[in-house]
Image (cartoon, rainbow, N blue to C red):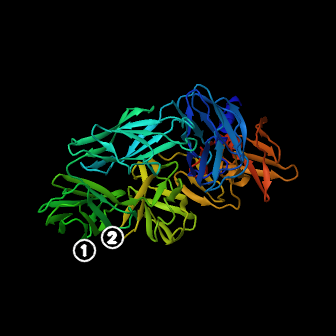
């Protein structure tokens, strides 16, 4: 009996890991409301940042818990979480239990109420989902900074030797709140010798007319700093005619900054053009229709484009639509440009005189490359000119995921595999049309024997079908503003004994069967194993499904019941009748004493077990084992905790969270 008791204990622990009712694919995105900036040896002043968990799919259930762990240098103080109770707080560890459900689209807000102890660098919080619908991961919630401001330069510009040249924007960020004084110069910014600050320079939107300038120096002083945490400087500089080609550097002559005391704000060149678009065109993946694009071409420096020369335009991620016209209109300057299509490129031929800065508008059509995802770029090259611009972006319309691929055996029919989850990137990103999920590699000895499709959101599907290793459906109505989630569940697959072993993937395709068919993404669905057919019986039960699969010597059949297994207090409860069939046992019920007796079927060996409705005592061959869940009667059907009884009969019981299924195997 020691052997049975020990195995029972192990099985209790294993079954205790079964999540109550989460969808295994549920996910959140972990963020913070802001990253606090903290001085050395200081504390978070003012408002504390909030950890924000946004539930995308699935449900976080009342009674479930998660654990939050702080990095070195911080301990929890007294955070109060709406919708949850603190059940464990020991230094850097915090465990909270939810007191209500959080469904798709809702936020879980957790204040980062912490005490800092000799903290330094990035301060992080690690989220342990503990089997809930919360994504595990690590988030930075604060940065311990010194007394030095941070500096960055946005878009270092190419400029010429002229007055009033615009350089790259310089952003100086206060190290910690209220660190900057207002009674003295914060910074003294110095340009190279011979350069000077143009009065068109702006700091936080105001020009520098009232600031002190001395030769190449600019003295930055603010009347008030209580509501300012950064300086945004948009330099306009006067460049001397004799300036050398190359980078233009600005030096911090006064003021503490993190990093080098000089930054590059511009580059002096002989020739430069700029190509730009007013709006980057968004193109859904799989949409191969022709799109009109409008691009501005402008000389940054006079005569950058010279007469009687050829410059080429090329695309990355798309091709020019040769069936549509390429138009170019001159808006400024005197240089003429004509176009000629040459295979995959367009030649720009110049003529006339060049002098004042020229500016042109180009209009043309593009067609995205099949299966391309990412930025579509336009490049201009020739005669020392080389520039590019992003003109469009092909975005993934949806993500396909399988939380935990299932391992199935060759030669066994109707084996359950994990759910396939397709989540739109944005509302309406999956367009009306035909879609398919192909199982790859393709194999004729594989068949899909069951599947269901459900949608969470306003998207509507129709004509769902599965055959020959392919799921197909049409989207009849696109999603509205909010993204939708498509779930294909209750999938069963049959593989013959000659099938390939290894990974089988679900490949999601748009415009299925059409010339514009496009692959959106793929995920491993299941793994096939050639472990052979085990003697004995196997029952596969799915939570919430009254029908289950019985497999005997490689042959399977679906058994129909009027009651479905469910989970209570993290224990799987099954009807006595279904359990007896799975265990190949005889079940008898004495209504007068409310006693259930389970004994081996004729010709089988095993224990005799009895239990009483409402009593947690399980008696196996005369020895009492205390269960943590008692048998109950629900809707006139008797339900028992299957883990305890299964072990009494020497059965192996496994739980698959991906498919929400229980497998009972008995030799």
Q: Position of residue 297 (x, y in %)?
A: 27, 62
Residue occupying image coordinates x 51% and y 56%: 413
Q: Is residue 610 left or right of residue 6?
A: right
Q: Decide if residue 444 is in sight here.
A: no
Q: Where residue 373 sits: x, y (%)? A: 37, 57
Q: Nearer the viewer, residue 291 or 564?
A: 291
Q: Is residue 99 visible?
A: yes
* Residue located at (13% from left, 62% from top): 307
Tell me if residue 553 comes above or below residue 277 in the rendering: above
User: Depth check: 42 or 10 in front?
Assistant: 42
The residue most toward the right is 592
Q: Which mark is residue 589?
A: none
- Mark linked to residue 325: 1
Q: Quadrant of the C terminus?
A: top right
Q: Is residue 489 above or below residue 363?
A: above
Provide the residue designation for mark 2.
Answer: 292
Q: Earlier in the sequence, mark 2 or mark 1?
A: 2
Q: Return the x and y of residue 32 as percentages of the image width and height.
A: 57, 44
> From the viewer's perspective, is 318 left or right of 409?
left
Count neighbours of disc 2 (C-alpha within 10 A) and say few if under 14, some if 14 to 19, many if 20 or more. few
Q: Position of residue 574 (x, y in %)?
A: 70, 51
Circles 2 and 1: CB atoms closer than 8 Å: no
What quarter of the picture does the N terminus occupy?
A: top right
In this rendering, position of residue 75 left or right of residue 409: right
CA separation in Å, label 2 and label 1: 10 Å
């Amino acid at each position: 009996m020691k052997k049975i008791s020990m195995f029972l204990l192990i099985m209790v622990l294993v079954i205790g890991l079964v999540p109550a009712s989460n969808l295994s694919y549920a996910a959140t995105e972990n963020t913070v409301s802001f990253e606090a900036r903290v001085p050395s040896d200081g504390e978070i002043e003012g408002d504390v940042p909030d950890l924000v968990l946004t539930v995308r799919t699935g449900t976080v259930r009342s009674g479930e818990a998660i654990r939050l762990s702080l990095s070195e240098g911080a301990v929890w103080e007294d955070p109060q979480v709406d919708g949850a109770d603190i059940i464990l707080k020991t230094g850097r560890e915090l465990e909270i239990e939810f007191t209500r459900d959080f469904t798709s689209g809702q936020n879980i807000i957790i204040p980062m109420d912490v005490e800092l102890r000799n903290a330094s660098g990035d301060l992080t919080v690690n989220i342990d989902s503990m089997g809930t619908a919360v994504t595990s991961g690590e988030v930075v919630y604060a940065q311990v900074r010194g007394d030095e401001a941070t500096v960055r330069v946005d878009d270092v510009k190419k400029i010429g030797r002229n007055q009033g040249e615009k350089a790259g924007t310089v952003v100086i960020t206060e190290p910690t709140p209220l660190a900057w004084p207002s009674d003295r110069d914060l910074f003294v910014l110095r340009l190279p010798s011979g350069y000077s600050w143009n009065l068109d320079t702006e700091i936080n939107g105001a020009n520098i007319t009232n600031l002190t300038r001395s030769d190449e120096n600019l003295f930055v002083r603010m009347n008030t700093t209580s509501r300012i945490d950064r300086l945004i400087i948009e330099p306009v500089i006067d460049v001397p005619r004799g300036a050398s080609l190359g980078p233009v550097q600005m030096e911090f002559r006064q003021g503490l900054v993190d990093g080098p005391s000089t930054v590059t704000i511009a580059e002096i060149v002989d020739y430069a053009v700029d190509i730009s678009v007013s709006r980057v065109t968004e193109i859904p993946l799989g949409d191969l229709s022709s799109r009109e694009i409008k691009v501005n071409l402008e000389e940054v420096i006079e005569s950058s484009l010279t007469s009687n020369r050829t410059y080429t335009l090329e695309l990355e991620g798309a091709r020019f639509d040769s069936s549509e016209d390429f138009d170019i209109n001159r808006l400024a300057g005197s240089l003429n440009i004509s176009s000629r299509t040459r295979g995959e490129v367009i030649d720009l031929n110049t003529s006339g005189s060049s002098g004042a800065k020229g500016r042109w508008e180009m209009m043309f059509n593009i067609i995205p490359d099949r299966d391309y995802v990412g930025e579509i770029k336009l490049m201009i090259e020739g005669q020392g000119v080389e520039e590019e611009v992003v003109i469009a972006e092909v975005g993934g319309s949806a993500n396909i995921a399988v939380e935990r691929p299932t391992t199935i055996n060759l030669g066994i029919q109707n084996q359950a595999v994990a759910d396939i989850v397709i989540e739109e990137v944005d509302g309406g990103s999956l367009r009306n049309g035909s879609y398919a999920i192909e199982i790859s590699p393709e194999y004729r000895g594989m068949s899909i024997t069951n599947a269901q499709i459900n949608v969470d959101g306003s998207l509507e599907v129709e004509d769902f079908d599965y055959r020959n290793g392919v799921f197909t459906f049409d989207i009849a109505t696109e999603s509205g503003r909010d993204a939708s989630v498509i779930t294909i569940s209750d999938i069963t697959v049959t593989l013959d004994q000659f099938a390939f072993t290894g990974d089988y993937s679900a490949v999601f395709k748009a415009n299925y069967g059409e010339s514009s068919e496009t692959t959106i993404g793929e995920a491993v669905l299941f793994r096939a194993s050639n472990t052979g057919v085990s003697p004995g019986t196997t029952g596969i039960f799915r939570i919430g499904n009254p029908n289950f699969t019985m497999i005997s010597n490689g042959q399977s059949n679906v058994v129909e019941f009027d009651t479905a297994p469910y989970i209570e207090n993290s224990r799987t409860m099954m009807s006595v009748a279904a359990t007896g069939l799975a265990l190949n046992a005889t079940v008898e019920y004495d209504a007068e004493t409310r006693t259930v007796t389970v004994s081996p079927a004729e010709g089988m060996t095993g224990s005799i077990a009895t239990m009483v409705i409402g009593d947690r005592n399980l008696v196996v061959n005369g020895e009492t084992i205390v269960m943590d869940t008692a048998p109950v009667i629900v809707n006139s059907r008797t339900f028992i905790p299957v883990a305890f009884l299964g072990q009494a009969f020497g059965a192996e019981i496994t739980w698959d969270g991906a498919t929400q299924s229980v497998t009972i195997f008995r030799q």
